[in-house]
Image (spheres, grey):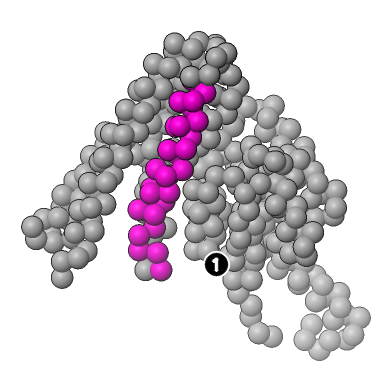
Amino acid sequence: MDKVRLQREAAFIRSSLLDQGYLDEQFIQLEELQDNDNPNFVEEVVTLFYTDSARLIYNIDQALLSNPTDFTKLDDYMHQFKGSCSSIGAKKVKNECNGFGEYCEAQNYDGCFRTFQQIKQEYINLKKKLETYFQLLKEAAQIK
Amino acid sequence: MTSRNLSTQLRALVVDDNMINRKIHQKMLNGLGVECMGVANGKEAVDVHCYGQSFDLILMDKDMPIMNGIEATKKLRSVGICSMIVGVSSRSMEVEIREFMEAGLNDYHEKPLTTAKLASIIHHIINTKVFYSYNDHFIFGKFLNDPFI
């Protein structure tokens, strides 16, 4: 596949992610920080996000298995996770986290559990799309 | 008199338990010509000062393990640290922001920070440094009959 076509595909994925609300202005802020000294800055930050948030997702999963449920701990983990989502501009995932916070406050276990499954789904969806996006950029960069 | 690019001589400390935020904020600050380091909690922020380091700007996250931003800010002010301390948090309840400000912050911003917000903070620090530098030179020069004045 030629360089221009790969770049166009990547640009299309990027526009879709922004237009459909998967990503927000914060992602554009990250792109603006990318320069010749750090040409892969955005990908590095996104990779760091997925590595770090895997730990938080595991903690939340474990906290949901605990009996009795520690809603304070759950809320703390979710606050950290939401903060990370916000930092990379993961808008849809972040918005799902708001619902979780409300169920925590109401100490509604079923609501927390259900919402968390949705959060994980959105998290995985975004991960797949971003992986495709960065792969296309990488392939385009390799073609002279 | 040689002109000094003060922005390249500023030092900042990013205090945040979230390594993503540390990476982003440090990159933003580097882009603005500010040398910076990052630590993961309030205790480490206090410790680096005890080891003799000084900073023009401290970006202080509120919620951190071991020592949070409120405790760290109070501790730093109690030992005479006069650096500009800007609190950052994703919590937005007024009572929480007020508690953080009362700990000794100069300013507070909600996360995520943007380059524009940081640039305005940096400009404020530079302008303050220029003002005091000018006044120190003016007063000193007057006493020594400095022909430069």
Residue at 52% over, 63% down: B30
Residue A106 visible within the image: yes
Question: On screen, B32 above or below B95?
Answer: below
* Residue count near mark 1 (Cα–Cα under 10 Å), binned few <14, some 14–19, many ≥20: some
In the rendering, at what x and y percent does residue B103 appear? Answer: 77, 40
Would residue B76 be found to the left or right of residue A30 on screen?
right
Determine the image quadrant of residue B119: bottom right
Q: Write down the region rendered in magenta.
A: A37-64
Would residue B11 be found to the left or right of residue B116 on screen?
right
Question: On screen, A14 above or below A21?
Answer: below
**Residue bearing the label numbered 1:** B33
B38 and B145: which one is in front? B38
In the rendering, at what x and y percent does residue B122 appear? Answer: 61, 59
Q: Which amino acid type is shown beneath numbered disc 1?
A: Gly
User: Which residue is most to the left?
Assistant: A1
Question: On screen, B30 above or below A86?
Answer: below
Identify the secondary structure beneath mark 1.
loop
Determine the image quadrant of residue B50: bottom right
In the rendering, at what x and y percent does residue A15 appear? Answer: 24, 43
